[in-house]
Amino acid sequence: MLLLVFAVCQKDDAIPTLNPPTLVAPTNGATISVNPPTLVWNTVNETSIAYRFEVAADSLFGTIIFSSGPVIPPDTSCTLDSVLTAGTYYWHACTRQNC
């Protein structure tokens, strides 16, 4: 069983951040049946942005399982490139300018 939980993206004061995208799927606390999962978020109405997201084995994101490169709009989803083992995972997405 895989359980994915939302987490809020932490602000890095060294890098300007914009409003984070709204995480759509998997929903908070969802048990997923498709593996590897596809992460989906709503777009942010900004110019010159890219999304980055991470999947971690812990809520503090100390053990990163997957970290994306820049995902350029209009794309608002990404499928992980490897299968996850059974467990609980956390994911968050950030919006960055010029990343």
Image (cartoon, rainbow, N blue to C red):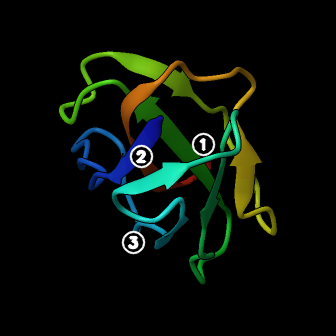
* Residue 20 at x, y percent in the picture: 41, 66
Q: Distance between the Cα atoms at labels 2 and 1?
A: 26 Å
Q: Which residue is labeled 2 in the image? A: 4
In this rendering, the answer to whether 60 lies above or below 19 is: above
Q: Secondary structure at mark 3?
A: loop
Tag in front: 3 or 2: 2
Q: Residues within 10 Å of mark 3 (few under 14, many from 20)?
A: few
Q: Secondary structure at mark 2?
A: strand
Of residues 70 and 85, which is closer to you in this image? 85
In this rendering, the answer to whether 46 lies above or below 51 is: below
Q: Toward which corner of the image does residue 19 lie, by quadrant?
A: bottom left
Q: Which residue ends up furthest to the bottom in the rendered image? A: 45
Q: Which residue is labeled 3 in the image? A: 19
In this rendering, the answer to whether 7 lies above or below 68 is: below
First in sequence: mark 3 vs mark 2: 2
Q: Are marks 3 and 2 in contact (CB under 8 Å)?
A: no
Residue 99 tag number? 1
* Residue 43 at x, y percent in the picture: 63, 75
In this rendering, the answer to whether 74 lies above or below 3 is: below
Q: Toward which corner of the image does residue 6 lie, by quadrant?
A: bottom left
* Residue 9 at x, y percent in the picture: 31, 51
